[in-house]
Image: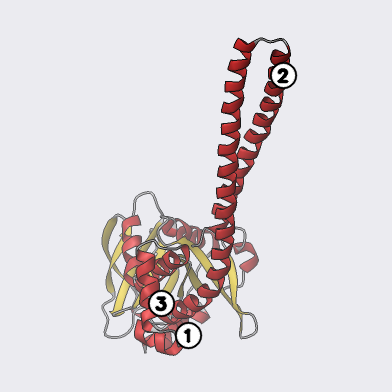
Amino acid sequence: MLSFKKEEEKIKFEMKNLDKELNKLNLELKDLKEDNSSLKRKNDYSALEKGIKAEKEIIYKIKFRLNEISKLKKKLKDLEIEKEESKVIKKDMDKVLDLINQGYTRPQAAKKSTISLSQISKWYSDGKENKSRICIYFYNQMNYIEDFSQGFFDILKKEFTHQNKISLMRSFVPKSYPKRLDRFYREDSKLWFSRLELRKQKSIYYFSIKGDTIPRLILIFDSDIYQSNFRLFDSEVWIRLEMDNVNKLKNDFKIMPVDEEKYPNQYYLSIGKLYDGELSKNLELLISNYGCYHGNYLERMFKVSLD
């Protein structure tokens, strides 16, 4: 995620502090000059010499702070230029990222977006080397998307430290696949989950509460974005669901509509950042407080995706 706002706030805060210091130094300088003028009239040259030395020190401090303010102003101006340039570049980057998120390879995404593969590679390598905020953004997003399938599973496994076996009802498992799966859980959570891998980058996730062998939430991960319940936006994991109690859910979750005209009851619901350690907590909250989500929409997707 780009951090222009925080950087701007930091620079402005530093400038504000320097302005306060300048005002204080200028008042000290004014008083000192008046004192030195008085000493000069009194011919107190010994004290005057010390006063002039103190005056020079304050002038040096003032010049130093003015120079620092000038540097910060330039930094703020450069940041504004970088921010405006990044807005333009980000649009092209997001075209590529959206295509990668749909399952296209980098060469395919380059061809479809009309952005050269060499440019995509440069953005990625510059981001890896921390050369600019916008390229760091691209590098991180590319890695999140390309590693999302396995990354999501690995992260969940780290949050659920215990493992045993569970047998699901045949109605929840496609034909020719085993219904006995690994179940992951932890002692301090009500939640458990299982994953059935169908093929590379296509799997079913089952979530439920301890003591319940019936899945309360079924989500399909598919590299074809249109067949998947999962979306990754700025390293934040969103799940696509059909929901009627959306107003209640807004008290605990970030929610946005999929398409109000085409899919009036379908929404994306955020379950947290991929690497923030909050996925299991938010999934438990969703299932414990708001019920089951493997109704009509997911059943339709289940048939389309797995038959």
Q: Which residue is mark 2?
A: 37
Residue type highlighted by circle 3: Ile
Which tag is nearer the camera, tag 3 or tag 1?
A: 3
Amino acid type of the residue tagged 2 in the rendering? Ser
Mark 2 or 1, nearer chain start: 2
User: Which of pointers 2 and 1 indicates the residue nearer the eye?
Assistant: 2
Q: Residues within 10 Å of mark 2 (few under 14, many from 20)?
A: some
Q: Is residue 179 left or right of residue 223?
A: left
Q: Residue at x 60, y 35 (%)?
A: 62
| Mark 1: secondary structure | helix
- For the residue carrying disc 1, how many other residues have a C-alpha within 10 Å: few (<14), some (14-19), or many (20+)? few
Front-lying residue, 282 or 121: 121
| Mark 3 vs mark 2: in front | 2
Q: CA distance from mark 2 to mark 1?
A: 90 Å
Give residue 299's position: percent from left, percent from top. 46, 82
Amino acid at dot 1: Arg
Return the x and y of residue 121 as percentages of the image width and height: 35, 76
Q: Nearer the viewer, residue 156 or 307?
A: 156
> Residue 92: x and y, percent?
50, 78
Q: Nearer the viewer, residue 24 or 299?
A: 24
Quarter where residue 117 is shown: bottom left
Q: Which residue is mark 1?
A: 300
Q: Which residue is mark 3?
A: 220
